[in-house]
Amino acid sequence: MITNNLTVKWCFPYALFAIARDAVYVFVISFYFLYLSRVLCLPLSFIIPMMIGIKVLDILKEPFIGTLIDCLSTKYNFDKYKVCILVGSFVNAIFVYLMFNIPNTSVGLKELLATLTLLGWMLSFSFYDLTSWSLISTFNASNLSREIASAIARACATLGFIVGLVLSTHYFSPNLDIINNLTVAAQKLFFYCAICLTISAVAFSSSFTNNYQAPKNINFKRTLKSFFNNDQLMIVFVLSLFQQICFNTFVSEYDIFLQNITDFDVKNTPYWVLQAPWVLGMFLTYFAFSFLTKLSSRRIVYVASIALPAIASVVLYLLVVTQSLTFLAYNILVALCGVGLSLSLVSTTVMTSDCVDYSEFKFGLRADCTTFSIQTISAKLGALFIVLISGISFSLSGTVLYDVPYEGSENYLAFCTVIIFVGSICASAIYFIYYKLHGSFFENILNNISNFTYDTENNNPRKKQNSVRYAIDEKCVIHDLPSNDLKEIINILTERLHNVRAINSKTDFLESLHNKMSLTPPGIAHGIAIPHTRGDFVNRSSLAIATLKNPIDCGSLDEKPCDLIFLIATPDDGKSHMNLLKNLSLMLSEPGFANKLRNAGSAEEITKRLIACEKNLFSYS
């Protein structure tokens, strides 16, 4: 849990660094395009392809940088959070200074220096950006702690973005002499940016304490394999990508909404007044996120986060085309978009943290920096998408040019509205169909995995004594199966195991299982049958369960028909098979427990009762 003591040690220094991190990032990106074109006088034919090319490389490198951090911290056993944030920020500050001190020399040399300094800046940024985000997954995996940590991280990032945007808007004002003296101004401004970033990193690293333990059995190849094979992480990536595309699309049409307000003088209104609705909505939602999930559920909160921007965007478009957009309507609808965005950002951050634990459960390794690179990839892809489709400038200086008319604005608004609406529907469908880290089993896994993997008091790895909770998947639990044929039941359960990728070959699995059953009937006693087999066709220890409407003969020694079927599949590693069979047998031998499973009203209830029995039997909380 996030206690008051932990808040002092983590929240305040982290907030200081996160705000500086994102403020400097936005300011640098906003200013660099202007610097290259106005100070170094580089042609757009060079600047735009160069920046897009480096941006693409920046996106592709993210999982490899994350894997490098995870592997190096394992090999040399250092606290990657402190080291990477401190060293990465210091190197990045150097590149910030170098980027805006490029000598205006011969053609060719300044292009090369502009490219190399930007590349170095983006590479060094990833080192402290990935570690500062992955830090969220180090807290106790309880829902409340993870949600609070994610909300704090997102609030700080948003505040940093706003600070960078406000500074950019201020310094890009045509009324200031800075536009005419960019060389001196850039050197001065970004010297201060470099100092600010370095000081915040030092403050964080010196005050932050964390019981970091480098993960074991991790290497470059294995980590990347777990990254790309993590099905839930890939789902989160797709959800985050739709999220970023919708958000960036909305931002690109923001000025058009302002221009079409019919009852308010936008041009002579202070900048902060126009931005206040969505900013206020976002920050209030960050503070309320954990309360909202407790009041409803993570699933409902995430669906609301998708629905709100889609609905608000459609209504805004209709009001613009009918020339009836008022200042009040604009404030309400933009605030709703801000609320939806903040809910979505925190939700996907929590999901990413959960995927760190899911990777540990599924692949036996914990690579948080690699996992969190998915967030950065989706954010950068979303930004690149809107740049390519709308042709907006790399510089954010155009965000306040309200008096510049947009040609074909209604067509562009319609296009953007369709993107947001379709993207929201696709994200909802993918979430409901494929994302599964919100069921009772996975909630239990994520809440208790730290207790099973590491004993912080004795500084020793824990033995996973009870492997049942790691083997069961709620999608492999069937309540009141109507079949009266054992072969059909086994085929159905096998299909479920294959669907969750617990087994890689249904044919080999069924052949081995039927061979074993021909020698030893699966029926045990008391109406329970446990067919089981092992081999290379099994990816991980897994368990499928069915309660039957009508008991069937499974060859039990007591000759009683069976209505509880437990199908066990394990790798042939010499221990998993017997451990899982032993632990399941101990649980089923508990007085009255088998009847509790029979009397359960749903697959979810069966799963919960198995987990509850496991906790009591093995004294884990």
Image: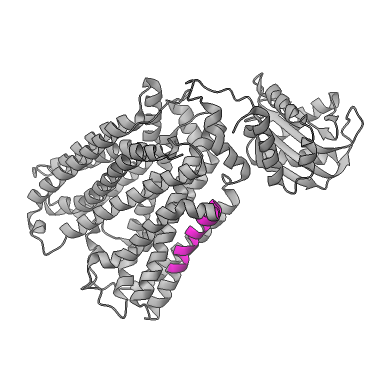
597 is higher (above) or lower (below) than 347: above
**Magenta stretch contains residue 301:** yes
Query: In the depicted view, which residue is nearer to us: 3 or 305?
Result: 3
- Horizontal side of residue 365 vs 621, given as left or right: left
Here the colouring is one colour
Quarter of the image where one finds residue 516: top right
Name the residue at 58% across, 46% down: 436
580 is higher (above) or lower (below) than 89: above
- Horizontal side of residue 593 vs 61, given as left or right: right
413 is higher (above) or lower (below) than 58: below
Q: Where residue 272 sits: x, y (%)?
A: 25, 64
Q: Farthest front residue? A: 4
**Magenta stretch contains residue 309:** yes
Q: Where residue 386 sits: x, y (%)?
A: 36, 58
Locate the C terminus by quadrant: top right
Name the residue at 26% across, 50% down: 26
Quarter of the image where one finds residue 273: bottom left
Q: Where residue 502 sits: x, y (%)?
A: 64, 35
Name the residue at 58% across, 22% down: 463
Q: Main secondary structure of the magenta part?
A: helix
Q: Where residue 62 sits: x, y (%)?
A: 37, 39
Residue 504 in view (yes/no): no
Residue 457 in view (yes/no): yes
Residue numbers of the magenta segment: 296-312
- Horizontal side of residue 195 vs 25, given as left or right: left
Query: In the depicted view, which residue is nearer to us: 111 or 568?
Result: 568
Total labels: the figure holds: 0
Name the residue at 23% across, 57% down: 166
